[in-house]
Each structure stands twice: as C-alpha cells, then as structure tokens.
Amino acid sequence: MDKKDYKILFVCLGNICRSPMAEFIMKHKVAELGVADKFEIASAGTSDEERGNPVYPPAREMLKRHGIGSQGKYSRQIVPEDYAYYDLIIGMDSSNIRDMHFAFDGDPEGKIRLLLDYTEHSRNIADPWYTGDFQATWDDVNEGCDALLTDLGFI
C-alpha cells in the first residue's frame, strides 16, 4: 500500500455500534498523529436493517466521553463496489468476515481482515447491542486501531 493513500472501511452487522466506533476512533487517532490527509476512513454494515439510522446512543456517548464526535454518520450497507474502492475492509467479528466474503464474491486481493487480527490476541469484538458492554467494545476497538496503525507504520 502506498503510504499516501489508505482507504479503510470498517464493517459490522448494522453499522450503528462497532464499525462507527472504529471509524471515529481511527479518524481521531490519525488526526492526532498528523496524518489524517493520508487516510480515507468510513464504515458500513453487512445488514440493511439499520440503514439510515444514526450511531446508537450508547456508542455515541462512549465516543463523546473520549472527546470524539460522530455527527452526521448514518448507517449504510456494504455494496459490491466497496471492494474495489477500499484498500482494507476490516470486520469486527467472524460473521462479518463471512458475510463480506459472500457480498464481495470472495476476497481475491486479500483486503478483508478481522480488526483484532492486528493484535496479539486475535478474536471477535463482541456486539454491544447484545452485550450492553460498550466499554469492552471501546477497549477492543481502540486496541485494534492502535495495532492497525502500528502495522501500517504510523505508531
């Protein structure tokens, strides 16, 4: 990948909790590092059930607690064109990975990854919609974003 242009799409099921948290945490981190101009960062869901909805209030509050806004974000579903457009397409759990392989007709370029595969402890990020534990999601997403930035050579 060219260090001048990283297009990253974070993906979860509904695009109202985990993937928007990853999108805005990563945007915050690259801005703090002074490299925001090298990145295009977005998020989407594998499902259309939340399409058009804003970031789920507890996820929005968790971001806000850390000084990160999420204004203007509305859920969208992945589309086949996303595969060609983005350099990295990063899922939050193994179900997201499976659904993306189906939606994109495989992964011929090796763009699809699990966020916590970048860490020392590869695992799924639990969906706080079901667990109610937005702090655990914050911790996992934050760890994953740091590990991704390390992998890309920015930390």
Image: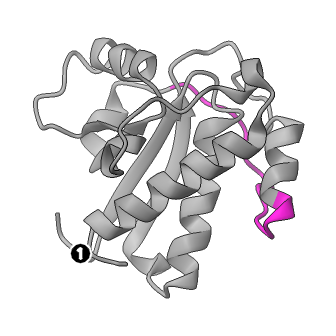
**Amino acid of disc 1:** Lys
Q: Is residue 3 left or right of residue 80?
A: left
Q: Is residue 141 left or right of residue 60?
A: left
Is 76 located above or below residue 31 in the figure? above
Residue 143 at what x, y percent from top left?
Answer: 51, 56
Q: Is residue 12 left or right of residue 106?
A: right
Residue 126 at what x, y percent from top left?
Answer: 60, 27
The span shown in magenta is 64-77
Is 55 located above or below residue 60 in the figure? above
Q: Nearer the viewer, residue 13 or 135?
A: 135
Is 16 located above or below residue 137 in the figure? above
Residue that appears at 34% across and 25% down: 80
Residue that appears at 32% across and 42% down: 117
Q: Residue at label 1?
A: 3
Of helix, strand and loop, which one carries label 1?
loop
Q: Nearer the viewer, residue 18 or 85?
A: 18
Residue 45 at what x, y percent from top left?
Answer: 55, 27
Q: Nearer the viewer, residue 140 or 49?
A: 140
Is residue 66 found inside the magenta-colored segment of the image? yes
| Location of residue 57 by image quarter | top right
| Location of residue 15 by image quarter | top right
Is 109 located above or below residue 135 in the figure? above
Residue that appears at 44% across and 82% down: 35
